[in-house]
Image (cartoon, rainbow, N blue to C red):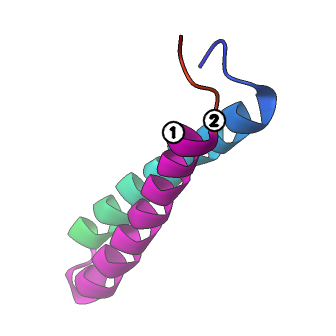
Amino acid sequence: MSGVPMPFQAILHEVEDLQNVCTRLEALAERHPPMSEPLMTIAGNVRNSATVLAVLVATRGPKPI
């Protein structure tokens, strides 16, 4: 992340946090089968949001030389 302006670093940090949330939700889904389907759906939605944020940084962030 070095060389990336601060606002974009902050967004990338949030992407990482969201990906960690997905991992935790997936682990909960494995431990609680009755809640597995909704937890996996939520994890997928959060992961999609993280991906959109990462694409935003990739397309709007500074271009490498």
The residue that disc 1 covers is: 58
4, 15: nearer the viewer? 4
User: The N terminus is located in which quarter?
Assistant: top right
Query: Amino acid type of disc 1?
Result: Ala
Can you give x and y, in whole percent of width and height, for residue 28 in the image?
34, 67
Q: Position of residue 18 (x, y in %)?
A: 52, 54
Across and down, in percent, residue 37 comes to: 24, 85
Q: Are marks 1 and 2 in contact (CB under 8 Å)?
A: yes
Checking the image for residue 16, the label placed there is none
Residue drawn where x is 40% and y is 61% of the image: 47
Callout 2 environment at 10 Å: few (<14), some (14 to 19), or many (20+)? some
The residue singled out by tag 2 in the image is: 61
Depth order, front residue of 35/50: 50
Q: Which residue corresponds to the image point at 79% horizontal and 28% vertical from the top-left?
A: 6
Relative to 9, is 46 above or below? Answer: below
| 45 within the magenta span | yes
